Amino acid sequence: MTMVRPAPGNAPVPVTAAPAPVRRSVPGRIRVISGITAASLALLFAALAAGTISAREGLRVIGRDAGPQVVATAGLYLALSDMDAQVANVLVMGDAYPEQRRDALARYERQRAEANRTLLQAFELSGDNPAERNTVQSVLDGLGRYEQLAGRALLLNEQAAHPPGPPPDNVVRTYREATDLMRVVLLPQAYNLTLESGTIVRATYDSQGVLAPLARAAVVLAGLVALACLVWLQVFLARRFRRVFGPALLVATVTTAAALLFGTSALGRDEAHLRTAKVAGFDSVLTLAKARAISNSMQGDQSRYLLDKERADTYQHTFLDRSLSVMYTEAGSLPEYHTAVAGHTTGYLGLLGPELVGRQGEVVAREYRRFQAADRAFRDLVTSGSTNEAVAERLGPVKTAFDAYDRALTELAGTHQKVFERSIRGGESALDNLWRLLPFAIGAIGVLMVAGVWPRLREYR
Protein backbone atom coordinates (compact mmCIF):
# COMPACT_ATOMS: atom_id res chain seq x y z
CA MET A 1 0.00 0.00 0.00
CA THR A 2 1.37 3.40 -0.98
CA MET A 3 0.73 6.66 0.93
CA VAL A 4 1.52 10.20 -0.22
CA ARG A 5 3.02 12.64 2.24
CA PRO A 6 3.23 16.28 1.11
CA ALA A 7 6.64 17.87 1.23
CA PRO A 8 6.96 21.58 1.72
CA GLY A 9 7.70 23.30 -1.54
CA ASN A 10 7.96 20.07 -3.44
CA ALA A 11 5.80 17.45 -5.13
CA PRO A 12 4.37 14.63 -3.02
CA VAL A 13 6.92 11.85 -2.25
CA PRO A 14 5.66 8.23 -2.33
CA VAL A 15 6.42 6.18 0.82
CA THR A 16 6.34 2.34 0.85
CA ALA A 17 5.10 0.73 4.03
CA ALA A 18 7.51 -1.83 5.67
CA PRO A 19 6.37 -5.49 5.73
CA ALA A 20 5.14 -6.83 9.00
CA PRO A 21 8.12 -7.83 11.23
CA VAL A 22 6.55 -11.18 12.08
CA ARG A 23 6.10 -12.21 8.45
CA ARG A 24 9.63 -11.13 7.62
CA SER A 25 11.12 -13.23 10.45
CA VAL A 26 9.40 -16.54 9.63
CA PRO A 27 11.65 -17.58 6.68
CA GLY A 28 14.69 -16.55 8.66
CA ARG A 29 13.64 -18.62 11.63
CA ILE A 30 12.95 -21.61 9.40
CA ARG A 31 16.44 -21.27 7.92
CA VAL A 32 18.03 -20.97 11.36
CA ILE A 33 16.23 -23.99 12.79
CA SER A 34 16.92 -25.99 9.63
CA GLY A 35 20.61 -25.03 9.81
CA ILE A 36 20.84 -26.08 13.46
CA THR A 37 19.12 -29.37 12.62
CA ALA A 38 21.47 -29.99 9.69
CA ALA A 39 24.46 -29.24 11.93
CA SER A 40 23.22 -31.68 14.59
CA LEU A 41 22.75 -34.35 11.93
CA ALA A 42 26.25 -33.69 10.63
CA LEU A 43 27.53 -34.05 14.19
CA LEU A 44 25.74 -37.40 14.53
CA PHE A 45 27.24 -38.79 11.34
CA ALA A 46 30.65 -37.39 12.20
CA ALA A 47 30.48 -39.18 15.56
CA LEU A 48 29.48 -42.41 13.81
CA ALA A 49 32.31 -42.04 11.30
CA ALA A 50 34.89 -41.28 14.02
CA GLY A 51 33.72 -44.21 16.13
CA THR A 52 33.87 -46.52 13.13
CA ILE A 53 37.38 -45.41 12.18
CA SER A 54 38.65 -45.84 15.74
CA ALA A 55 37.06 -49.28 16.10
CA ARG A 56 38.42 -50.41 12.73
CA GLU A 57 41.92 -49.34 13.76
CA GLY A 58 41.65 -51.47 16.89
CA LEU A 59 40.56 -54.48 14.85
CA ARG A 60 43.38 -53.89 12.37
CA VAL A 61 46.10 -53.74 15.03
CA ILE A 62 44.86 -56.72 17.05
CA GLY A 63 43.50 -58.83 14.21
CA ARG A 64 45.80 -58.06 11.27
CA ASP A 65 48.98 -56.41 12.50
CA ALA A 66 50.49 -56.69 16.00
CA GLY A 67 48.23 -59.59 17.03
CA PRO A 68 49.40 -61.96 14.28
CA GLN A 69 52.96 -60.76 14.86
CA VAL A 70 52.73 -61.84 18.53
CA VAL A 71 51.46 -65.27 17.52
CA ALA A 72 54.17 -65.53 14.85
CA THR A 73 56.97 -64.67 17.29
CA ALA A 74 55.51 -67.09 19.84
CA GLY A 75 55.68 -69.71 17.11
CA LEU A 76 59.30 -68.71 16.57
CA TYR A 77 60.07 -69.48 20.23
CA LEU A 78 58.43 -72.86 19.80
CA ALA A 79 60.32 -73.67 16.59
CA LEU A 80 63.69 -72.68 18.08
CA SER A 81 63.19 -74.65 21.30
CA ASP A 82 62.02 -77.69 19.34
CA MET A 83 65.05 -77.52 17.05
CA ASP A 84 67.35 -77.79 20.06
CA ALA A 85 65.27 -80.60 21.55
CA GLN A 86 65.44 -82.63 18.31
CA VAL A 87 69.23 -82.27 18.13
CA ALA A 88 69.49 -83.58 21.69
CA ASN A 89 67.18 -86.48 20.82
CA VAL A 90 69.33 -87.50 17.85
CA LEU A 91 72.57 -87.29 19.80
CA VAL A 92 71.32 -89.44 22.68
CA MET A 93 70.02 -92.15 20.30
CA GLY A 94 73.52 -92.88 19.06
CA ASP A 95 73.69 -95.38 16.21
CA ALA A 96 70.44 -97.14 17.20
CA TYR A 97 66.78 -96.40 16.37
CA PRO A 98 67.36 -95.36 12.72
CA GLU A 99 63.68 -94.64 12.08
CA GLN A 100 63.35 -92.43 15.17
CA ARG A 101 66.55 -90.59 14.27
CA ARG A 102 65.26 -89.92 10.77
CA ASP A 103 61.99 -88.60 12.21
CA ALA A 104 63.85 -86.34 14.64
CA LEU A 105 66.12 -84.97 11.90
CA ALA A 106 63.12 -84.39 9.62
CA ARG A 107 61.36 -82.53 12.41
CA TYR A 108 64.51 -80.47 13.00
CA GLU A 109 64.52 -79.43 9.34
CA ARG A 110 60.82 -78.57 9.42
CA GLN A 111 61.24 -76.44 12.51
CA ARG A 112 64.30 -74.74 11.03
CA ALA A 113 62.28 -73.84 7.93
CA GLU A 114 59.41 -72.68 10.16
CA ALA A 115 61.78 -70.52 12.22
CA ASN A 116 63.19 -68.85 9.10
CA ARG A 117 59.70 -68.32 7.65
CA THR A 118 58.47 -66.86 10.94
CA LEU A 119 61.46 -64.53 11.18
CA LEU A 120 60.77 -63.22 7.68
CA GLN A 121 57.12 -62.70 8.59
CA ALA A 122 58.10 -60.91 11.80
CA PHE A 123 60.48 -58.71 9.80
CA GLU A 124 57.70 -57.75 7.38
CA LEU A 125 55.21 -57.11 10.18
CA SER A 126 57.69 -54.98 12.13
CA GLY A 127 57.16 -52.20 9.57
CA ASP A 128 59.32 -49.15 10.31
CA ASN A 129 60.11 -50.14 13.90
CA PRO A 130 63.94 -50.18 13.97
CA ALA A 131 64.19 -51.94 17.36
CA GLU A 132 62.09 -54.90 16.21
CA ARG A 133 63.91 -55.11 12.88
CA ASN A 134 67.27 -55.16 14.65
CA THR A 135 66.07 -57.90 16.99
CA VAL A 136 64.83 -60.00 14.09
CA GLN A 137 68.14 -59.51 12.27
CA SER A 138 70.04 -60.50 15.42
CA VAL A 139 67.99 -63.69 15.75
CA LEU A 140 68.62 -64.52 12.08
CA ASP A 141 72.36 -64.09 12.57
CA GLY A 142 72.33 -66.15 15.77
CA LEU A 143 70.26 -68.86 14.13
CA GLY A 144 72.87 -69.19 11.43
CA ARG A 145 75.59 -69.71 14.05
CA TYR A 146 73.41 -72.22 15.90
CA GLU A 147 72.81 -74.25 12.73
CA GLN A 148 76.57 -74.46 12.14
CA LEU A 149 77.22 -75.71 15.69
CA ALA A 150 74.28 -78.14 15.62
CA GLY A 151 75.35 -79.47 12.23
CA ARG A 152 78.88 -79.98 13.49
CA ALA A 153 77.63 -81.84 16.60
CA LEU A 154 75.44 -84.08 14.45
CA LEU A 155 78.33 -84.82 12.11
CA LEU A 156 80.69 -85.69 14.98
CA ASN A 157 77.97 -87.83 16.50
CA GLU A 158 77.52 -89.75 13.27
CA GLN A 159 81.27 -90.30 12.94
CA ALA A 160 81.48 -91.58 16.54
CA ALA A 161 78.82 -94.28 15.89
CA HIS A 162 78.30 -94.66 19.65
CA PRO A 163 75.58 -96.79 21.30
CA PRO A 164 72.48 -95.13 22.82
CA GLY A 165 73.30 -92.86 25.72
CA PRO A 166 75.87 -90.09 26.24
CA PRO A 167 77.97 -89.38 23.11
CA PRO A 168 81.75 -88.75 23.17
CA ASP A 169 83.10 -85.64 24.90
CA ASN A 170 83.81 -83.74 21.66
CA VAL A 171 80.15 -84.14 20.65
CA VAL A 172 78.96 -83.01 24.07
CA ARG A 173 81.22 -79.93 24.05
CA THR A 174 80.03 -78.90 20.60
CA TYR A 175 76.40 -79.39 21.56
CA ARG A 176 76.94 -77.36 24.75
CA GLU A 177 78.01 -74.39 22.63
CA ALA A 178 74.93 -74.79 20.46
CA THR A 179 72.41 -75.20 23.29
CA ASP A 180 73.97 -72.36 25.31
CA LEU A 181 73.61 -70.08 22.28
CA MET A 182 70.00 -71.18 21.90
CA ARG A 183 69.00 -70.90 25.56
CA VAL A 184 71.01 -67.81 26.52
CA VAL A 185 70.73 -65.71 23.35
CA LEU A 186 68.18 -66.84 20.77
CA LEU A 187 65.24 -67.84 22.97
CA PRO A 188 65.38 -64.64 25.08
CA GLN A 189 65.53 -62.55 21.89
CA ALA A 190 62.57 -64.42 20.43
CA TYR A 191 60.66 -63.87 23.66
CA ASN A 192 61.50 -60.14 23.55
CA LEU A 193 59.94 -59.94 20.10
CA THR A 194 56.77 -61.45 21.54
CA LEU A 195 56.78 -59.02 24.46
CA GLU A 196 57.25 -55.98 22.19
CA SER A 197 54.37 -56.91 19.94
CA GLY A 198 52.27 -57.96 22.92
CA THR A 199 52.74 -54.50 24.45
CA ILE A 200 51.27 -52.95 21.29
CA VAL A 201 48.27 -55.29 21.44
CA ARG A 202 47.61 -54.57 25.12
CA ALA A 203 47.97 -50.80 24.62
CA THR A 204 45.58 -50.87 21.66
CA TYR A 205 43.05 -52.99 23.51
CA ASP A 206 43.23 -50.76 26.60
CA SER A 207 42.77 -47.63 24.51
CA GLN A 208 39.80 -49.19 22.74
CA GLY A 209 38.34 -50.03 26.14
CA VAL A 210 38.28 -46.29 26.83
CA LEU A 211 37.50 -44.95 23.35
CA ALA A 212 34.71 -47.37 22.40
CA PRO A 213 32.33 -46.38 25.26
CA LEU A 214 33.14 -42.71 24.65
CA ALA A 215 32.37 -43.11 20.94
CA ARG A 216 29.03 -44.75 21.69
CA ALA A 217 28.17 -42.06 24.22
CA ALA A 218 29.06 -39.35 21.68
CA VAL A 219 26.86 -41.03 19.05
CA VAL A 220 23.93 -41.32 21.46
CA LEU A 221 24.27 -37.70 22.58
CA ALA A 222 24.58 -36.39 19.02
CA GLY A 223 21.66 -38.56 17.93
CA LEU A 224 19.39 -37.28 20.71
CA VAL A 225 20.30 -33.69 19.84
CA ALA A 226 19.55 -34.34 16.16
CA LEU A 227 16.18 -35.91 16.99
CA ALA A 228 15.32 -33.02 19.28
CA CYS A 229 16.16 -30.54 16.53
CA LEU A 230 14.01 -32.42 14.00
CA VAL A 231 11.08 -32.40 16.42
CA TRP A 232 11.66 -28.69 17.10
CA LEU A 233 11.58 -27.96 13.35
CA GLN A 234 8.37 -29.92 12.84
CA VAL A 235 6.61 -28.32 15.81
CA PHE A 236 7.59 -24.85 14.62
CA LEU A 237 6.31 -25.50 11.09
CA ALA A 238 3.09 -27.10 12.39
CA ARG A 239 2.30 -24.17 14.67
CA ARG A 240 3.31 -21.43 12.27
CA PHE A 241 1.39 -22.81 9.30
CA ARG A 242 -1.40 -24.42 11.33
CA ARG A 243 -0.92 -27.77 9.65
CA VAL A 244 -0.25 -31.32 10.75
CA PHE A 245 3.32 -32.62 10.79
CA GLY A 246 4.88 -32.98 7.36
CA PRO A 247 5.36 -36.61 6.22
CA ALA A 248 8.84 -35.91 4.81
CA LEU A 249 10.17 -34.62 8.13
CA LEU A 250 8.47 -37.46 9.99
CA VAL A 251 10.26 -39.97 7.75
CA ALA A 252 13.52 -38.05 8.26
CA THR A 253 13.05 -38.32 12.03
CA VAL A 254 12.38 -42.06 11.84
CA THR A 255 15.40 -42.53 9.56
CA THR A 256 17.61 -40.60 11.98
CA ALA A 257 16.37 -42.70 14.90
CA ALA A 258 17.07 -45.87 12.89
CA ALA A 259 20.59 -44.65 12.02
CA LEU A 260 21.21 -43.87 15.69
CA LEU A 261 20.05 -47.31 16.84
CA PHE A 262 21.87 -49.17 14.08
CA GLY A 263 25.10 -47.21 14.58
CA THR A 264 25.07 -47.66 18.35
CA SER A 265 24.34 -51.36 17.95
CA ALA A 266 27.15 -51.80 15.39
CA LEU A 267 29.69 -50.08 17.62
CA GLY A 268 28.52 -52.17 20.57
CA ARG A 269 28.82 -55.41 18.58
CA ASP A 270 32.28 -54.40 17.45
CA GLU A 271 33.35 -53.79 21.05
CA ALA A 272 31.99 -57.20 22.08
CA HIS A 273 33.74 -58.93 19.16
CA LEU A 274 37.01 -57.20 19.99
CA ARG A 275 36.73 -58.24 23.64
CA THR A 276 36.06 -61.85 22.65
CA ALA A 277 38.91 -61.83 20.13
CA LYS A 278 41.34 -60.52 22.75
CA VAL A 279 40.28 -62.44 25.86
CA ALA A 280 38.91 -65.74 24.53
CA GLY A 281 41.02 -65.84 21.38
CA PHE A 282 44.31 -63.98 21.33
CA ASP A 283 45.23 -64.33 25.01
CA SER A 284 44.54 -68.06 25.01
CA VAL A 285 46.39 -68.67 21.73
CA LEU A 286 49.42 -66.80 23.07
CA THR A 287 49.31 -68.61 26.42
CA LEU A 288 49.09 -72.02 24.76
CA ALA A 289 51.89 -71.13 22.34
CA LYS A 290 54.10 -70.25 25.31
CA ALA A 291 53.09 -73.48 27.05
CA ARG A 292 53.96 -75.50 23.96
CA ALA A 293 57.36 -73.82 23.65
CA ILE A 294 58.19 -74.38 27.31
CA SER A 295 56.97 -77.97 27.11
CA ASN A 296 59.17 -78.61 24.08
CA SER A 297 62.12 -77.34 26.08
CA MET A 298 61.11 -79.71 28.88
CA GLN A 299 61.18 -82.64 26.47
CA GLY A 300 64.61 -81.53 25.30
CA ASP A 301 65.76 -81.35 28.92
CA GLN A 302 64.97 -85.05 29.23
CA SER A 303 67.40 -85.89 26.41
CA ARG A 304 69.95 -83.37 27.65
CA TYR A 305 69.72 -85.03 31.09
CA LEU A 306 71.12 -88.21 29.51
CA LEU A 307 73.34 -86.45 27.02
CA ASP A 308 75.49 -84.37 29.39
CA LYS A 309 76.29 -86.08 32.67
CA GLU A 310 78.13 -83.02 34.05
CA ARG A 311 74.99 -80.90 33.69
CA ALA A 312 72.45 -83.61 34.49
CA ASP A 313 71.41 -82.01 37.79
CA THR A 314 71.08 -78.64 36.11
CA TYR A 315 68.81 -80.06 33.42
CA GLN A 316 66.71 -81.86 36.03
CA HIS A 317 66.20 -78.60 37.97
CA THR A 318 65.42 -76.81 34.72
CA PHE A 319 62.81 -79.43 33.91
CA LEU A 320 61.21 -78.88 37.33
CA ASP A 321 61.20 -75.09 36.97
CA ARG A 322 59.56 -75.31 33.58
CA SER A 323 57.03 -77.85 34.82
CA LEU A 324 56.08 -75.52 37.67
CA SER A 325 55.58 -72.66 35.24
CA VAL A 326 53.30 -74.78 33.02
CA MET A 327 51.23 -76.30 35.83
CA TYR A 328 52.02 -75.11 39.32
CA THR A 329 51.64 -77.11 42.50
CA GLU A 330 53.50 -77.10 45.80
CA ALA A 331 56.66 -79.20 45.37
CA GLY A 332 60.24 -78.87 46.54
CA SER A 333 61.71 -81.48 44.23
CA LEU A 334 60.89 -83.26 40.99
CA PRO A 335 59.71 -86.51 42.69
CA GLU A 336 57.39 -84.42 44.90
CA TYR A 337 56.09 -82.65 41.80
CA HIS A 338 55.42 -85.95 40.04
CA THR A 339 53.39 -87.14 43.03
CA ALA A 340 51.48 -83.85 43.37
CA VAL A 341 50.58 -83.64 39.66
CA ALA A 342 49.40 -87.26 39.56
CA GLY A 343 46.74 -86.48 42.19
CA HIS A 344 45.90 -82.98 40.95
CA THR A 345 42.67 -83.04 38.94
CA THR A 346 41.00 -79.67 39.67
CA GLY A 347 41.90 -76.08 40.47
CA TYR A 348 44.91 -75.88 38.17
CA LEU A 349 47.40 -73.04 38.51
CA GLY A 350 50.31 -71.88 36.42
CA LEU A 351 50.43 -70.94 32.76
CA LEU A 352 47.88 -73.55 31.71
CA GLY A 353 45.56 -73.02 34.68
CA PRO A 354 43.03 -70.63 33.08
CA GLU A 355 42.94 -72.68 29.87
CA LEU A 356 42.15 -76.08 31.41
CA VAL A 357 38.37 -75.75 31.28
CA GLY A 358 35.83 -77.73 29.31
CA ARG A 359 36.36 -81.07 27.62
CA GLN A 360 39.43 -80.06 25.66
CA GLY A 361 41.03 -78.55 28.74
CA GLU A 362 40.54 -81.78 30.64
CA VAL A 363 42.15 -83.71 27.79
CA VAL A 364 45.22 -81.46 27.99
CA ALA A 365 45.42 -81.92 31.77
CA ARG A 366 45.12 -85.69 31.46
CA GLU A 367 47.82 -85.92 28.79
CA TYR A 368 50.10 -83.66 30.85
CA ARG A 369 49.76 -85.97 33.85
CA ARG A 370 50.63 -88.92 31.61
CA PHE A 371 53.69 -87.10 30.31
CA GLN A 372 54.87 -86.43 33.87
CA ALA A 373 54.21 -90.08 34.82
CA ALA A 374 56.36 -91.20 31.88
CA ASP A 375 59.09 -88.82 33.00
CA ARG A 376 58.95 -90.27 36.50
CA ALA A 377 59.38 -93.82 35.18
CA PHE A 378 62.25 -92.64 32.98
CA ARG A 379 64.13 -91.00 35.86
CA ASP A 380 63.47 -93.93 38.19
CA LEU A 381 65.20 -96.12 35.63
CA VAL A 382 68.19 -93.76 35.56
CA THR A 383 68.59 -93.76 39.36
CA SER A 384 68.24 -97.55 39.49
CA GLY A 385 71.61 -97.93 37.75
CA SER A 386 70.27 -99.35 34.51
CA THR A 387 72.46 -99.37 31.40
CA ASN A 388 72.53 -96.40 29.04
CA GLU A 389 70.83 -98.49 26.37
CA ALA A 390 67.96 -99.36 28.71
CA VAL A 391 67.56 -95.74 29.77
CA ALA A 392 67.64 -94.49 26.19
CA GLU A 393 65.04 -97.13 25.35
CA ARG A 394 62.79 -95.57 27.97
CA LEU A 395 62.83 -92.26 26.07
CA GLY A 396 60.45 -93.85 23.54
CA PRO A 397 57.43 -93.94 25.91
CA VAL A 398 58.37 -90.45 27.16
CA LYS A 399 58.34 -89.11 23.61
CA THR A 400 55.04 -90.85 22.87
CA ALA A 401 53.45 -89.33 25.97
CA PHE A 402 54.81 -85.90 25.08
CA ASP A 403 53.51 -86.10 21.52
CA ALA A 404 50.00 -86.90 22.79
CA TYR A 405 50.18 -83.96 25.21
CA ASP A 406 51.47 -81.64 22.46
CA ARG A 407 48.65 -82.68 20.12
CA ALA A 408 46.10 -81.89 22.82
CA LEU A 409 47.69 -78.45 23.29
CA THR A 410 47.65 -77.84 19.54
CA GLU A 411 43.97 -78.78 19.22
CA LEU A 412 43.02 -76.50 22.12
CA ALA A 413 45.04 -73.65 20.59
CA GLY A 414 43.32 -74.25 17.25
CA THR A 415 39.91 -73.87 18.89
CA HIS A 416 40.88 -70.51 20.37
CA GLN A 417 42.45 -69.44 17.07
CA LYS A 418 39.10 -70.02 15.36
CA VAL A 419 37.38 -67.92 18.05
CA PHE A 420 39.91 -65.15 17.42
CA GLU A 421 39.50 -65.16 13.65
CA ARG A 422 35.70 -65.42 13.84
CA SER A 423 35.49 -62.50 16.27
CA ILE A 424 37.74 -60.29 14.15
CA ARG A 425 35.66 -61.05 11.06
CA GLY A 426 32.45 -60.38 13.00
CA GLY A 427 33.68 -56.99 14.18
CA GLU A 428 34.85 -56.01 10.71
CA SER A 429 31.54 -57.14 9.19
CA ALA A 430 29.55 -55.01 11.64
CA LEU A 431 31.62 -51.94 10.79
CA ASP A 432 31.46 -52.65 7.05
CA ASN A 433 27.66 -52.77 7.17
CA LEU A 434 27.54 -49.51 9.10
CA TRP A 435 30.00 -47.84 6.73
CA ARG A 436 27.98 -48.92 3.68
CA LEU A 437 24.70 -47.60 5.12
CA LEU A 438 25.99 -44.23 6.30
CA PRO A 439 26.05 -42.53 2.85
CA PHE A 440 22.50 -43.70 2.08
CA ALA A 441 21.25 -42.49 5.45
CA ILE A 442 22.93 -39.10 5.00
CA GLY A 443 21.52 -38.68 1.49
CA ALA A 444 18.02 -39.83 2.43
CA ILE A 445 17.76 -37.56 5.48
CA GLY A 446 19.11 -34.60 3.48
CA VAL A 447 16.54 -35.09 0.71
CA LEU A 448 13.70 -35.52 3.21
CA MET A 449 14.65 -32.34 5.07
CA VAL A 450 14.67 -30.34 1.84
CA ALA A 451 11.34 -31.89 0.85
CA GLY A 452 9.87 -30.92 4.22
CA VAL A 453 11.23 -27.37 4.48
CA TRP A 454 11.41 -26.08 0.90
CA PRO A 455 7.61 -25.91 0.25
CA ARG A 456 7.18 -23.76 3.37
CA LEU A 457 9.90 -21.34 2.26
CA ARG A 458 8.36 -21.04 -1.21
CA GLU A 459 5.19 -19.68 0.30
CA TYR A 460 7.11 -16.48 1.12
CA ARG A 461 8.30 -15.83 -2.40
Image (cartoon, rainbow, N blue to C red):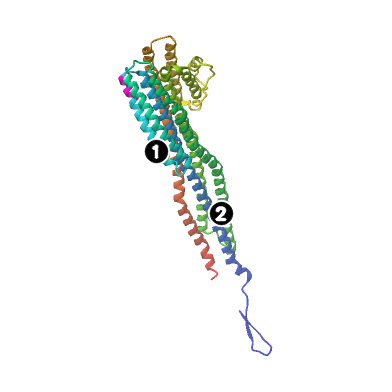
From the viewer's side, name the closer residue of 25 and 251: 25
From the viewer's side, name the closer residue of 219 and 119: 119
Residue 433 higher or lower than 423, as above or below? below
| Position of residue 153 measured from the top left corner of the image (x, y, whole percent) | 37, 24
User: What segment carries the magenta color?
Assistant: 98-104
Dividing the picture into quadrants, the one containing residue 23 is bottom right
Badge 1 amino acid: Leu
Disc 1: which residue: 120
Dividing the picture into quadrants, the one containing residue 161 is top left
Q: Is residue 143 left or right of residue 211?
A: left
Q: CA distance from mark 1 to mark 2?
A: 51 Å
Badge 2 amino acid: Ala
Residue 53 higher or lower than 452, as above or below? above
Q: Residue at x 49, y 56 (%)?
A: 445
| Position of residue 160 measured from the top left corner of the image (x, y, whole percent) | 33, 19
| Position of residue 88 measured from the top left corner of the image (x, y, whole percent) | 39, 22
Disc 2: which residue: 226
Residue 88 higher or lower than 8, as above or below? above
Q: Which image quadrant: the N terminus?
A: bottom right
| Residue sticking out furthest to the front | 170
> Callout 1: helix, strand or loop?
helix
Magenta stretch, main secondary structure class: helix
Q: In this rendering, which labeled residue sits more in front, label 1 or label 2?
A: 1
